Image (cartoon, coloured by chain):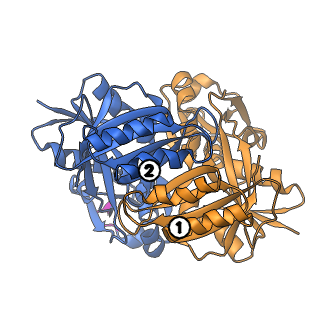
Chain colours: A blue, B orange
């Protein structure tokens, strides 16, 4: 029996992504924070963990990146990734109309992604941030007739309650979230793989350039570079890169060996099949 | 008379940073969002705008970066930067004790920065996100005896109200925020300068490496690289770099000309004196 810890609560995007990958026979445990998902996997209370890492409109999920920085000794390795299209809906009580909406609740990322639509359709409503889209819906369930509450979230959140209805919010731009699958030990190797690396550089002119030379030389494509504060000293950074290839391929091995010589910190976070 | 638009409300870190630079004789206008600050400057309703760009613990302020991406034709240029140490305090009503606190309100960045302290001192309180630290304090002012509300914010926010007191939260790590000064036209040149550039690259192996070659060749130090989603296509990125030097120095001119040849989008956001 496989146990999957995911960033909850239920019916959120992370839950949907986890079920898409692990199917109906796995046991699902929802955890309130990214930190809790990592811990459940580290303590072997779950076989795998699922956390968001990046959205195509809002960018990196910094909580997840920073967990890799804050616990550099963690035995967790990235086992895979899941890509999930995001469709938002405006969720309100059955019988209430769009014109009655006065407050919209949602997760900050969902509010940000629907900023333009809200500006056009509901320009005068108050926006309130919640910890999750599921929390936002709980505010709507406690709505009183004159409060005019609505939430933004997946259509599934409305379908779970007979008292609610959902109005689809049209997409303006490609909105996808990428999730990481966390586990202990190394992942199975796929046909096409990706490797994620965390490193820091000596502070001198050309340091980042020099770090990238081994990838250029070995014709390895970087799909992603992300910088994050080191948190030890202001304006000192760590880098996350994703590259195409598996850590056991000779050219990847050579490139990573080359990178390592110019770093002060170096950790391979995982080699895993590219997800779609 | 100089008018300064800043990300408000009053007494927040951005306000303190703006006053530090422009002094008591300027007129200050607070704007509710980063977008409003940009617009006030673009319409010449303010001579300068002040917005946060980066915190040493939490990283980039993505709203500010994305405004540069969303309005590439904006006439705004970065005129300077301000660095500001951040000291947080727990703000509660006079007469109430730490042991009575049940809910802590604050801006998500402040809550994140005090996560560890809250975990030790107030492990069981509920954390509620607000739009600003000043908003958080307004919740404390409306506190009823049994609610146990507190806020996290600058000590100045408590000093503005006789009913409030502040308990200093000890710093664990270097916590500073960097602010940008926005304006029209180019900035005066300082003794030591910095140049900020926004660009995008062709998608091919070695593209980022090749883009950095001109800086290495001209011995120009990059102090910062940040990637952001293009928002036009999933997993396509734009880059922000800060480099040491002024756009009118020949070696910087040469390097930027070299960079431009490998980009699909290229914009100098400003050359300005390095702030401390």
Classified by dominant secondary structure, the portion drawn in magenta counts as loop
Assess disc 1: are there few (<14), some (14-19) or many (≥20) residues with their C-alpha within 10 Å of its C-alpha: many
Residue at left 62%, top 27%? B172
Q: Position of residue A132 (x, y in %)?
A: 38, 47
Mark 2 and mark 1: Cα distance apart in space? 18 Å
Say left or right for A273 vs A136.
Answer: left
| Span colored in magenta | A92-96
Q: Is residue A136 visible?
A: no
Q: Is residue B50 magenta?
A: no
Is disc 2 in contact with disc 1, using a CB cutoff of under 8 Å? no
Residue at left 53%, top 32%? B115
Looking at the rendering, which quadrant does residue A187 occupy? top left
Q: Chain of mark 1?
A: B
Residue at left 58%, top 22%? B99
Q: Position of residue A85 (x, y in %)?
A: 27, 60
Residue A225 - label = 2
Say left or right for A105 vs B99.
Answer: left
Q: Which residue is mark 1?
A: B69
Q: Is residue B39 visible?
A: yes
Assess disc 2: are there few (<14), some (14-19) or many (≥20) residues with their C-alpha within 10 Å of its C-alpha: many
Which one is closest to the eye, mark 2 or mark 1? 2
């Amino acid at each position: 029996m496989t146990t999957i810890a995911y960033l909850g609560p239920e019916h959120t995007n992370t839950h949907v992504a986890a079920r898409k990958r692990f199917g109906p026979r796995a046991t699902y445990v929802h955890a309130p924070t990214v930190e809790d998902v990592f811990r459940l996997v580290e303590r072997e209370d779950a076989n795998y963990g699922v956390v968001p890492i990046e959205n195509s409109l809002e960018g990196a999920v910094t909580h997840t990146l920073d967990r890799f920085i804050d616990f550099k000794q963690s035995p967790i390795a990235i086992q895979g990734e899941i890509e999930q299209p995001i469709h938002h809906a405006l969720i309100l009580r059955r019988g209430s109309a769009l014109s009655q909406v006065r407050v919209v609740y949602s997760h900050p990322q969902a509010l940000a992604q629907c900023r333009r639509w809200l500006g056009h359709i509901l320009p005068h409503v108050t926006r309130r941030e919640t910890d999750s889209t599921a929390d936002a819906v709980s505010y709507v369930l406690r709505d009183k007739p004159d409060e005019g509450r609505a939430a933004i979230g997946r259509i599934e959140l409305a379908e779970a309650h007979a008292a609610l209805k959902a109005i689809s919010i049209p997409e303006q731009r490609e909105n996808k979230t990428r999730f990481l699958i966390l586990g202990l030990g190394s992942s199975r190797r796929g046909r096409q793989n990706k490797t994620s690396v965390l490193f820091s550089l000596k502070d001198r002119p050309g340091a980042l350039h020099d770090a990238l030379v081994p990838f250029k030389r070995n014709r390895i494509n970087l799909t992603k570079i992300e910088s994050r504060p080191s948190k030890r000293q202001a304006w000192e950074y760590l880098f996350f890169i994703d590259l195409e290839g598996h850590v056991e391929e000779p050219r990847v091995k050579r490139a990573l060996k080359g990178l390592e010589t110019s770093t002060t910190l170096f950790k391979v976070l995982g080699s895993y099949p590219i997800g779609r």
